Image (tube, rainbow, N blue to C red):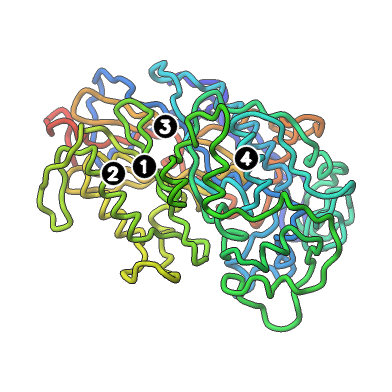
Amino acid sequence: MQGTTGSTLDSTIRRGPILRQGSEQPYYGLERGPGEPHRPRTELAERRVDSQRRSLAYLAHLTDVQLIDVQSPGRLEALHRFGRRPDTALLLPMQRPQEVLAAHATEALVTALNGLRTSPLTGAELQLVLTTGDNVDNMQWNELQSFMRLLSGGDVSMDSGGPEYEGVQDGRFPWAWAPDDPDNLWGRAHGFPHAPGLVNAGLRPFRASGLTVPWLTCYGNHDGLVQGRAPADRALAALTVGHRKVFDLPPGPLGDFVSDAAQMFTGPAWDVTASYERRLLTREQFVESHFGVGEEPSGHGLTRANLREGTTYYAYDGVPGLRVIVLDTTNPSGLFEGSLDRRQLVWLTERLHEVHRHYEDADGRVVSGGGDDRLVVVASHHPRTSMTNDRVGPGEDPGGRVLGEELAATLARFPHVVAWVSGHIHRNALRPKATTTGGFWEITTSSVMDWPSQARLMEIMDNDDGTLSIVCTAVDHAAPLAPDDMSSPRGLASWHRELAANDPMGVGGFEAQGTVADRNVELVLPDPRARRSSTGRVR
């Protein structure tokens, strides 16, 4: 099938030759690989090969940018001194060698998506970019402002410090890569290059081009919890805007970062420039930040009801024939895994009722809805397998949190749900969910922050034979393969991708791109709007 420049239909990017050998691991360069055509996945249905297809919706998915203020006192990078011990493994990573360049990787992906506005399959125009949370790393005001400008266009600056860099990559700490120091112990152990000036280049302001189509927001655990794990309190809020940056932990046993994070910030520290721009955001302030002059759509999906109620879940009907339902799976009681509260599940059921003529109630009986039979895409930060967080906070429904399996069972009752889109695990992963009425596809996309730093195109097709297809295409960002330039956002994005490909602490791991069955695929499923027929066999 003919590809499009920028998509992985033409060519792919993979880890290539070893450039340097560290004492703990080799450091790889990147190389071009062959393009990957769309592979059919027929676990839920098969389409007729000669069917006349048409596009119903053409969307893009971007997730887990984790845009980061690398100089913030509200980060506990010193945990990396201890490595992957049983008591620290689930708290890492809190520092990445490529993190100062996350904004540049995002800019390069935005550029790539703007260049892919026309579908290579149908010629349809890109209608919407869907983000699924962890837009920022540490729920800070300055991080979110820069994220908004990256996606909507405007001046971006990730430098919140003084005249000189005030972070942990300055060569003083052997557990963090220091690109200016050729003798840095971490760099030598992992084969990382000597790249003087890289951090300062990453902190330079630049002007972001912005998406040329509307985009929707989503609330992830890093958007609403300190370091994606701990609920904000007065002590954490004060130290984040303060001048004391910790470089080691206090003596004694490792504390509990979720229930008493502030205690872990009482270790040795040095003075940095304080800044109120680093203030921690409440849910209400997160919502309010999405309303401004010229945004498209208004609130980026969030509504005035969200403003009044302090919620971050909503339904979006801006794509004809499609309802997008964005959930909030961040547990305000802490931990990085997700769940819903009971009130949100009731709200979700009501929104699904509105766009179904018929569906199953909780007892399996077919009941009438109020709908016009639109298709439904559900989006959340956490996928089903990561919705395991049953912590119940003060004032919450005593019935407990809604975990992944219960949410999946609820979605399965509504036949017009065709996809559940998510991020969080920083890996490309696709899995079918069979139901009594056909099923839907769970679509998880890898992160921008970690390797392979990709986005995903998703085109929903009517196959005119009783089936639908969701055609997924991985997108690499628009930056050179080999980094050799620190003067432009494009050149810095190239550095980001190669460093991420060698980061041993990447959340998704070195195989985060998934298998070929998780990337460029055609996901076939029964069309819930049509009767089953011999031309659209259902398995």
For the N terminus, give its image quadrant.
top left
Q: CA distance from mark 1 to mark 4?
A: 22 Å
Tag 4: residue type? Phe
Residue under label 4: 147
Q: Relative to 216, is 76 on the left or the right? A: right
Q: CA distance from mark 3 to mark 4?
A: 23 Å
Residue under label 1: 325
Front in this rendered view, residue 500 or 31? 500
Tag 2: residue type? Arg
Q: Nearer the viewer, mark 4 or mark 2?
A: 2
Question: Which disc is residue 396 wearing?
Answer: none
Say which label, 2 or 3, has the lower sequence index: 2
Say which label, 3 or 1, has the lower sequence index: 1
Q: Are marks 4 and 2 in contact (CB under 8 Å)?
A: no
Give me the residue at 36% from left, 37% from top. 324
Q: CA distance from mark 4 to mark 2?
A: 29 Å
Tag 1: residue type? Ile
Say which label, 3 or 4, has the lower sequence index: 4
Tag 3: residue type? Met
Q: Relative to 487, is 345 on the left or the right? A: left
Question: Which disc is residue 351 wearing?
Answer: 2
Give me the residue at 61% from left, 74% from top. 260
